[in-house]
Amino acid sequence: MKQIASRISIYSADAFGVCSALYELGGLCVMHDASGCNSTYNTHDEPRWYDFDSMVYISGLSEMEAIMGDDQKFIDDIVYTAKELNPNFIAMAGTPIPTMIGTDFKAIANIIEKETNIPTFGFDTTGMHSYVSGAYKAFEALAKRFLKRNDKESRAEEKESIDKESREVKNTIIKVNILGATPLDFSINKSVEAMVDLLKENNFEVISTWAMGSSSRIYKKCRRCRCKLSCVLFWNGCRKIYV
């Protein structure tokens, strides 16, 4: 009886939740770890690899870099790769080793963004928490960064859209954003497609799906919803989206 586990491990780690949430959005996702996390995520938690690739990498953290707290190679590698691949954004996810040495991902993100002019996110994931918290952080950061716009261009676009809608015949279709869909909950067995079809059959217009089966500019589509209805599939940062 002493060998019986009273607690089972998490289904998938928070770092994998970040990568899964952002997989289809055209970003460069880097897990800061020596080795192992990337292969575990690719072979066990990401069935979409069979259909198309994504920019998900491992940093290759060395023992000496961890001992000395040397973040410069990590920064240089990401900057070089970002300039080569030109991603829509850059996302870094922590694992147990960076957690133990206290890596400051937010500071690193600021440095990388200044050097590349590409939106950069640093997530203080630990590899010890559930994928739900990782997806929460990823969706929330993405929404806060790209949905909260208050410039003249966006206000003009919004006014034009409202005027156009007011001129049209009153539309009874409710616009919907499906929020929180990843293979970690819904796999690739057509579950999400079935939800979309069901909503369309019942006179709903699906604006976007966060984040399966949508384009890399998903946040631009999401703004069109105007809060008429948002359908949250599992609790994460999506429910805190500002639209």
Image (cartoon, helix red, strand yellow):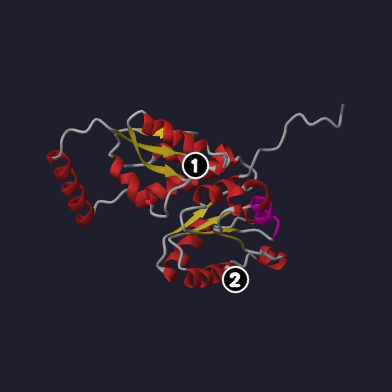
Q: How many marks?
A: 2
Mark 1 closeness class: few <14, some 14–19, many ≥20 residues within 10 Å: many
- What is the magenta segment's predominant secondary structure? helix
Q: Is residue 147 visible?
A: no
Residue 182 lies, with reference to residue 110, above or below; the image says above
Q: Report if residue 182 lies within the magenta region.
A: no
Query: Are the residues tagged 1 and 2 within 8 Å (C-beta)?
Result: no
Q: Residue furthest left?
A: 167
| Residue at numbered disc 2 | 73
Mark 2 closeness class: few <14, some 14–19, many ≥20 residues within 10 Å: few
Q: Tell me the residue at 44%/71% (across/down).
A: 115
| Mark seen at residue 210 | none
Q: Is residue 131 visible?
A: yes
Residue 124: % across, % down: 55, 50
Q: Secondary structure at mark 2?
A: helix
Which image quadrant is residue 70 in? bottom right
Report the side of 52 relative to 116 (left or right): right
> Looking at the figure, which quarter contains the C terminus?
top left
Amino acid marked by disc 1: Tyr
Q: Which residues are magenta?
A: 35-42
| Residue at numbered disc 1 | 136
> Looking at the figure, which quarter contains the N terminus?
top right
Residue 201 lies, with reference to residue 206, above or below; the image says above
Amino acid marked by disc 2: Lys
